[in-house]
Amino acid sequence: MCRIQCYLEPACWTFNFCEKQGNFVCELTNSDHIRHDLIEKAGCTYHGSENHCSSNPCPKNATCQGEFLSDPVPYKCICPAGYGGDNCFQDINECNDGTHTCHSDATCNNTIGGFNCTCKSGFNGNGKHCEDIDECESGKHNCHVNATCTNSLGGFNCSCKQGHFGNGTHCYPDFGRRVIFDFEDGKKTGWSLTGTAFNNQPTYKDNSKARGKPSNLQGNWWIGSYENGPSPSHTYGSTQGDGPRGTMTSPPFVVHGSQLKFRIGGGCTMQQQRAELLIGGTVVAQTKGPCSEYMVTKSWSIEQFRGQTARVRLVDNHNGGWGHINFDYLEEYQ
């Protein structure tokens, strides 16, 4: 029993085993004694050790302690905190074995011979004690001005206020649907052109006299690269034919809704006549007409582009038969 106590106590080198009033007592001492005759103490037996540590058998970063057991190695090396193994050179990963003292809302990072603690995102503290940051109260959130910020443990949530919709970081007024371009002012203000296909646009009223089929326009004005009716006073039935080629690109608009709808007709091949949706200069969607003068309604999903700037580009790149495109009434739906 005394041997075990001395073995477990790093400062112990020798001990006295004494019997006092029927009880056994262990007296541990912290001096190392080579075995020799000592003055007897009534009721006690002295147990000394040979100094097995005098030859410095342990690594430099360890403490040697002599044993009292008849093991093949009659000493033990006490490793410094954070190290283990036979030679005390093996780093102990306190983070993996659960012996660290980091807070439950902190991240434990193992280091050579130790560890450090870092509070997780959304928390403040020294790593051993972490407190939730109220981003809503401190103003460290990114909720939209028309959203409500709600604090949560380690974070926050944003929800658009009544009368608005969105993901909380972007909120837009409820509008159901809105018309972006309908050309009803008879102008193409802000649109940029290349080539000559769209020089005489928008065109006024329908022109079924020349084409033999209605265009299904919305209102009085629309885009038709075959047409030549840029004013109400222009000769009814005038056309410029399929020869001119070019593009017509809209002014920028910010995406708020989930869907764009529009009317499109004309050309038969995507490579030659099409409508394109551009986000940041990149074409993200495109479609063509039904190879008919009669415009049909088509749509693009735009929910993933909310908050971004978009443009619509009309392309007429063919000067043969069906070398034109019809377009009208671009709407955005919530």
Image (cartoon, rainbow, N blue to C red):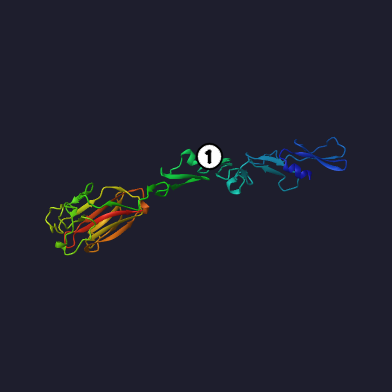
User: Which of 3 and 122 lies nearest the eye of the viewer?
Assistant: 122
Which residue corresponds to the image point at 61% horizontal and 47% vertical from the top-left? 98
Q: Quadrant of residue 51?
A: top right
Under mark 1, the amino acid is Asn
Residue 89 coordinates in the image, percent (x, y): 60, 44
In which quadrant will I find the N terminus?
top right
Drawn side of residue 136 relative to residue 7, left or right: left
Drawn side of residue 123 relative to residue 6, left or right: left
Q: Which residue is mark 1?
A: 124
Q: Quadrant of residue 34?
A: top right
**Image: 177 above or below 11:** below
Residue 84 coordinates in the image, percent (x, y): 63, 45
Drawn side of residue 173 relative to residue 65, left or right: left
Residue 206 coordinates in the image, percent (x, y): 18, 59
Q: In terms of secondary structure, where does tag 1 sit? A: strand
Which residue corresponds to the image point at 75% horizontal and 42% vertical from the top-left? 6
Residue 63 coordinates in the image, percent (x, y): 67, 39
User: Which of 16 and 232 lies nearest the eye of the viewer?
Assistant: 232
**Image: 69 above or below 227:** above
Drawn side of residue 178 relative to residue 136, left or right: left
